[in-house]
Amino acid sequence: MINRVVLTGRLTRDVELRYTQGGVAVASGTLAVSRRFQTKNGEREVDWINFVIWRKSAENFANFFHKGSLVGIEGRIQTRNYENQQGQRVYVTEVIVENFSFLESKSSTGNGSYQNNRPQNNTSDPFANNGDPIDITDDDLPF
């Protein structure tokens, strides 16, 4: 059986870092992942995907990533359920992160939190386009 997921998105809030009674670090958060296709209004819908990271990786993730950070995560989907205080059964689906990647430099998001989707004007970057999006059509792509 294969249970593998790879996601790229932005953190919706700072990661919540906690420790179990045994002292094991666990971090949880939500990743906003844009869908590939646009709606009839020209907007992209977003999926809000919960994730969990364990041990030293959880501490590292919480220290380096903040709300708005663009990150890549790799792991497996896991489901669980529990009974809440009202006696109702609650079902949870989340990604258990095994690997993660920085997808932008800290300087592109200011102080580590997401400011906007435009990079700062950087004259040493020939692809910066003065912070404006570069217009690329399907004809420009090699595939």
Image (spheres, rainbow, N blue to C red):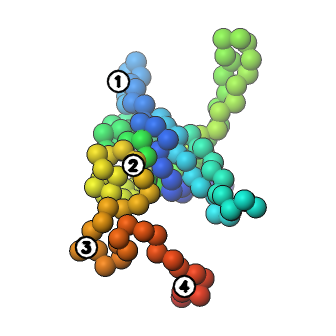
Point out the tag, 1 or 2, that comes first from the N-terminus: 1
Residue assigned mark 4 = 141
Q: Which mark is residue 65?
A: none
The vertical placement of 136 against 106, above or below, is below
Q: Are marks 1 and 3 in contact (CB under 8 Å)?
A: no
Between the C-alphas of marks 2 and 4, the distance is 29 Å
The vertical placement of 107 against 60, above or below, is below
Measured as percent of width and height from the top left, residue 31 is found at 52, 45
Point out the tag, 3 or 4, that comes first from the N-terminus: 3
Measured as percent of width and height from the top left, residue 98 is found at 45, 48
Q: Which label sits in the foreground, 2 or 4? A: 2
Residue assigned mark 1 = 23
* Badge 2 amino acid: Gln
Residue assigned mark 3 = 123
Q: Which label sits in the foreground, 4 or 1? A: 4
Q: Secondary structure at mark 4?
A: loop
Q: Secondary structure at mark 1?
A: loop
Q: Which label sits in the foreground, 1 or 2? A: 2
Taking depth in this image into account, of 102 and 113 the one nearest to the observer is 113
Between the C-alphas of marks 1 and 2, the distance is 34 Å
Residue assigned mark 2 = 115
Crowd band around label 4 with a 10 angstrom C-alpha radius: few (<14), some (14–19), many (20+)? few
Q: Residue at x 42, y 41 (%)?
A: 67
* Badge 1 amino acid: Gly
Point out the tag, 1 or 3, that comes first from the N-terminus: 1
Point out the tag, 2 or 3, that comes first from the N-terminus: 2
In this rendering, does residue 64 appear at all? Answer: yes
